[in-house]
Image (cartoon, helix red, strand yellow):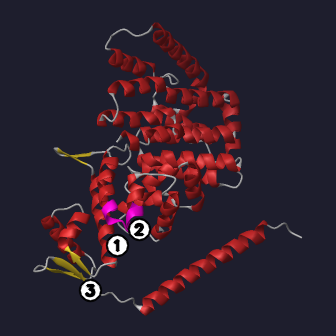
Amino acid sequence: MANYDLTPRIAPNLDRHLVFPLLEFLQERQLYADEYILKAKIELLNNTNMVDYAMDIHKSLYHTEDVPQEMMERRAEVVARLKALEEAAAPLVTFLQNPNAVQELRADKQYNLQMLNDRYQIGPEQIDALYRYAKFQFECGNYSGAADYLYQYRALCTNSEKSLSALWGKLAAEILMQNWDIALEELNRLKEIIDSKNFSSPLNQVQSRIWLMHWSLFIFFNHDNGRTQIIDLFNQDKYLNAIQTNAPHLLRYLATAFIVNKRRRPQFKDFIKVIEQEQYSYEDPITEFLACVYVNYDFDGAQKKMRECEEVILNDPFLGKRIEEGNFSTVPLRDEFLENARLFIFEIYCRIHQRIDMGVLAEKLNLNYEEAERWIVNLIRTSKLDAKIDSKLGTVVMEPNHPNVYEQLIDHTKALSGRTYKLVSQLLEHAQAQPAR
């Protein structure tokens, strides 16, 4: 299953601290040799200030209590540098620790800067020192302190580039602390900045969208409403274009979100067209499953892909997280995926067959005969499926479903209204963009 591991593609688009949770998961799943993972961790830690962590891993890797001299020297450098930065940022940190003083801060940054300078002799140098101190705290693995200082820094910062960097840092810190609600707020704040018209160059804008989508995976597959919100973000034209151009591996996560979503999204048909376009340039069991069902009507192929999909989900750091419930460890997303995947197969299979042999259907659904019969009975009871089971012949008989002319007319009218609104909006945008004469 290492062939389907996306970590080598995802890691270059993450902050190095965000790669550690992925390596921890792979180590737990034993997808690679333990030695390989430990060496990858040390390589990542070489460019951080988490020296104590690096020492612990070195001891585990080489089965020794001794550590190289350069690690000891590096630790001394980090401690000295941390002390120097702490002293430089001390005036502003002391101010921020005073609740009464902080209440004087306003939304007006210019007022804040003037007030800090006049009353507390805190100027641009101390504010910049707070940024460096927060960044160093993050590199040391103190994500809570870094998040607090970066938040305060952004309230005082007038440098747009450093303010953006601080926002990325705060987002990473909130993700690593698993504060999913706050992380989602920071993600949306960052998205607004990236999508704004005055954001850097178009090339940087595309790259930033790709980074944002990769970082968002931590949030969307942990937040309660994440599986819906990932569709809202990834399926936007600008973001979907970035995926198709530079990061097609992200289609795995968008496809999974569509499959496990309880409410069938209207964008699903358009997404199937994207899957059809990309099926020859990117291979993934989950996207291939959708292609088998909705593009090629290959139900035998879909059945095989379902088995692969289960393994892919179990071994994916974002999709395969286990949730401990009492004495049991479950993977709820896998269970939802398989249930909905069977439903997809059943729906399409029923559209092209009027009478279906129960044994054949059980094989297509990866179930035995009794399980398939119970599954279909429950489906008929809980949905508006027009079907009945002929127990004597062992078949499922589909009732003819004639389209309602009035419903079709209403749907077409809604679609026409939506297109008209979109066209008018584009015309207005074009008119506003034209220079006044």
User: What residue is drawn where x is 35% and y is 24%?
Assistant: 35
Check residue 295 for magenta coloring.
yes
Q: Element under label 2? A: helix
Three-letter code for the amino acid on which mark 3 is drawn: Glu
- Most frequent secondary structure within the magenta stretch: helix
Task: State which region is magenta.
Answer: 290-302
Q: Element under label 3? A: loop
User: What residue is drawn where x is 61% and y is 38%?
Assistant: 165
Choose the circle earlier in sequence order: 3 or 1: 1
Three-letter code for the amino acid on which mark 2 is drawn: Tyr
Q: Element under label 1? A: helix
Choose the circle earlier in sequence order: 3 or 2: 2
Tag 3–tag 2 contact (CB < 8 Å):
no
Q: From this viewpoint, is residue 157 visible?
A: no
Residue wearing tag 3: 399
Mark 3 nearby-residue class (10 Å; few <14, some 14–19, many ≥20): few
Check residue 25 for magenta coloring.
no
Image coords of residue 432 (percent x, y): 77, 69
Residue wearing tag 1: 348
Relative to 354, is 234 above or below?
A: above
Image coords of residue 70 (percent x, y): 49, 10
Dividing the picture into quarters, in which one does residue 112 lie? top right
Residue wearing tag 2: 294
Residue 72 is labelled as: none
Relative to 5, is 220 above or below?
A: below
